[in-house]
Image (cartoon, coloured by chain):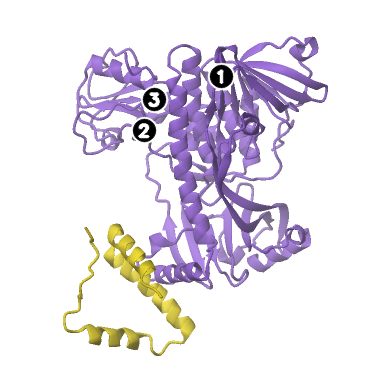
Amino acid sequence: MDLPRYPYHQTLEQRSGQPQRRPVVIVGAGPVGLTLALDLAKRDVPVVVIDDSDRIGEGSRAVCWAKKTLEVFDRLGVGEAVAREGVRWQRGRVFHGEREAYAFDLLPESHHKMPAMVNLQQDQVEARLVRAAQLDPRIELRGRHELIGLEQDAEDPSQGVTLTVRTPDGLFDMRADWVVGCDGARSPTRTLLGLSFTGQVFEDRFLIADVRLGAGVRPRGLDPARPERWFWFDPPFHRGQSVLLHAQADGLWRIDFQLGRDADVEAERDAERIKARVAQMLGTDGFELAWSSIYQFCCRRASAFRVGRVLLAGDAAHQVSPFGARGANSGVQDADNLGWKLAAVMKGEGGEALLDSYEAERIEAADDNIGHSTRATDFISPKSALSRRLRKAALDLAAHTEFAKPLVNSGRLSMPTDVPGSVLNTPDADVWTGGPAPGCPAPDAPLDGGWLGEQLRGRFTLLAFGMAAPDAGVEVLSAPCDSLAAQRYGAAPGSLYLIRSDAVVAARWRAFDAGAVRAALARAHGRPHE
Amino acid sequence: MSKLTLTPNFGREADAFYAELIAAQASLNDEQAADWLARLTLILCNHIGDRDVLREAFALAHQHHD
């Protein structure tokens, strides 16, 4: 598929020197910025997205898209295409030396619209998002606009934000009510805000090689028609290090070689050297090297995700190692969390406390992701001889005892982070023995020949089980009690769930009470004292 | 209050236990013995399970050295 571009054009406001005040400017046209732009546009908020480039970044980069991300994409109209084009897999195998240490199965629960995980190279996902954005008249996507200055009036934030942008025609100022920096780990937005970005830098270097296998090539017995995630600790073809193999779409495979702390980065960039490594691993030279990159990983987070009218999302706000696919997935979930809140604040439907809740909820998620990612990275690159020996012990034991399998950590795959302590939640007053508690994601299930998740449509919904739709001042979705949905929600006749626009449970009850629903709606909109 | 057992727990058999521990790895070279000890650590930690007890044991092991 040809990748779309967003070429630079000189705009009227630029030519006239009269900046037009925009409701929202998003900095960065990656998966996070574009998800947020599409989400805001669906809520009738016009958006300008600026990017310092005019094209999609090279190479596959992010590969694994988790169920929650696919559900967000689906709401924005690109989920089905990503799920269809992506490679589905559910089996992961972990090898130690010559032997298989253990295997895991994602065991996806059936009867969800979206699979647990699909693999699709990031540029293909971005191509879908760029096309959708370019087709939406409420989104203006501007290439070669590099953010170099950011100013807001600390005394009077309602004055908005002035952005200074460098273009091929020189510098000019843009103005916005709100700015969201989705501009990646080296975020100019974060830097201009003067926020610290601290955490752990891992010394190990990793080489990422994307290869296309020739017809009939079966690397180490892997059947390309039945893709699996393979991870090796200390394999015979790459002693003392780890290797990860992941399927991508169109016959492309991702191989991730740990190179260690003392790797000669310049020498490792040599294509012939990379091909030799891949050939040794695959046991054949029947492949073509499509893309490669050398990485060093960091796990760190910005000290704040909001400063006045400027917000941060995605890698600009937090960075993780790739083990666990928590980078792009958590970034898309930031956008999912922020879109409805920003739109509600702009329309006067929600208090600014909503934006503080964005920061609180997504800092909790970032810390959860960083914790998982740090633990995986520590297991993959032990820092001492004893740590290495304990890892070997865990891997040896995992081959024949159940208890050691969960100790082996080659990356814990991305799951949404629950926010049970969020100020937007109304704590349970009734007794529940099952179903998602306030702060947990609302699970999908078949409903009315379609899907429950589809019918939430990105707006607040009261999900009512086995009862006539009550008049509650909010969209009502009715579900029968003899359904899988009722099972998943632990529901009995009369049970109700108030579900947020980002498909997180805000409150639930065993019986309808209009006053309680009203109070929970107000609280979930950052107006707790109504 | 400490949850970690710090009183003798082998009854009158302390010497016999210790002899068994030594005998169990007597045939191993240093490298093999260190691996064995690492596996044993994980096996026993899982058997104990209680994270508070384990944390107390980790701290105690830090205190008692020359």
Report the residue at 48% width, 40% height from top. A366
Which amino acid is tagged 1?
Ala
Element on which disc 3 rests:
loop
Q: Could you say which chain is coloured purple in the image?
A: A
Host chain of mark 3: A
Quadrant where the C terminus of chain A lies? Answer: top left
Q: Which residue is mark 1?
A: A41
Q: Nearer the viewer, residue A349 or A284?
A: A349
Host chain of mark 2: A
Picture quadrant of residue A82: top right
Question: Label 3, label 2: how many angstroms apart (C-alpha)?
Answer: 9 Å
* Residue A463, disc: none
* 3 or 1: tag closer to the N-terminus: 1
Which amino acid is tagged 3?
Arg
Report the residue at 44% width, 78% height from top. B34
Q: Colour of chain B?
A: yellow
Q: Which residue is mark 2?
A: A442
Q: Which residue is mark 3?
A: A500
Name the spot of residue A179 as percent of width and height, x first: 60, 22
- Above or below — where is B52 with respect to A486? below
Report the residue at 68% width, 11% height from top. A20
